[in-house]
Image (cartoon, grey):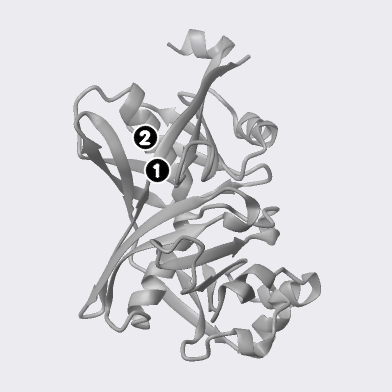
Amino acid sequence: MKEILANELTFYIVDVFAEYKYEGNQLAVVISEDILSDTMMQKIAKEMNYSETTFITSIENYDVRIFTPTTELSFAGHPILGTAYILKKFFIKEKVKTISLNVKLGSIAVLFKYKGDIINEVWMEHKSPTFHGFFAPEFLAEVLGIKDEDIDTRFNIQEVSTGVPTIIVPLKTLDAVKRAKINTEPYERLIQNIEAKTILIFCPETYNKNNDLNVRFFADYYGVPEDPATGSAAGCLAAYLVRHEYFGKPSIDIKVEQGYEIGRNSLLLLRADKKENKFYIMVGGNVYLIAKGSLL
């Protein structure tokens, strides 16, 4: 096995959280079986040039490493779901309901839902959330290039983490979401002394009437001006929604659209409950296989 891989690395391209094929967030999954150095994995991730590339370093143990074109990540949502899909489709013969992927953050449970023998949805269980500081609406309006009155001040702007810290900003309208853009100088001031480097904005108006929220996600610090679908940030959003009872109760079962503004329509499924300060958070969606090839 390793002699073959030394000369030719198999990789797969998948679309994760896609409403339809050729939408959602792209992911490259490389079967590396622990023969690549950190430097080579970083070079391949840069060559792929997606938001993340994953490397399955052990098929038997489900060990996975996640790289962006510039750095390694301890955790990320759509890479975990897309990689679990590849493991199940090509390497796990029985019809399992769950597996656990081992990433730098720890063991992450992934659930498969089927239609007959075909995987219909892939779901990921998030770690228990942590909640951090609040931010002034006026300052975030400056960071996002929007008006103060665009922010829904019924709810606090807060830093939340289920693995990757994210600043969650509630807006009132789809128009405000569409107008948002990152202003570099105030953005750099914002992230200078906090752990969170990414911003998720959302509103209750949607392009598709069947969806519950519209979301945009900015990660300029990591070289990703806008991500079409973000499972890690979706977990933070789910925690935020139930903690603040955004829908009037400490539980959600909703559809979240993302990526519409950049032409990569994505659909994320969020389920979460809070009972006695304990959170149960699941993020799921569809995965489509796009291509299989070899790295020489």
- Residue at the spot x=69%, y=71% of the render? 179
| Amino acid at circle 2 | Tyr
Whether residue 46 is visible? yes
- Residue at the spot x=45%, y=51% of the render? 77
Give how far across and how far down residue 246 sits, in percent: 37, 81
Q: Answer with the quarter of the image where residue 253 lies.
A: bottom left
- Secondary structure of the residue carrying tag 1 is helix
- In the drawing, what numbered circle is on residue 228? none
Whether residue 162 is visible? no
The residue tagged 1 is 81
- Secondary structure of the residue carrying tag 2 is helix
* Picture quarter with the N terminus: top left
- In the drawing, what numbered circle is on residue 85? 2
Q: Residue furthest right?
A: 185
Label 2–label 1 contact, CB within 8 A: yes
- Residue at the spot x=51%, y=62% of the render? 207
Q: Nearer the viewer, residue 172 or 285?
A: 172
Residue 231 lies left or right of residue 225; in this view the side is left
Q: Residues within 10 Å of mark 1 (few under 14, many from 20)?
A: many
Give how far across and how far down residue 264 sits, in percent: 57, 48
Give how far across and how far down residue 144 sits, in percent: 69, 75
For the image shown, how many numbered marks are present on the structure?
2
* Picture quarter with the C terminus: top right
- Residue at the spot x=56%, y=25% of the render? 36
Task: In the rendered view, tell whether residue 279 sits above or below residue 39.
Answer: below
Give how far across and how far down residue 173 sits, in percent: 56, 78
Q: Residues within 10 Å of mark 2 (few under 14, many from 20)?
A: many
Residue 29 lies left or right of residue 146; in this view the side is left
| Amino acid at circle 1 | Leu
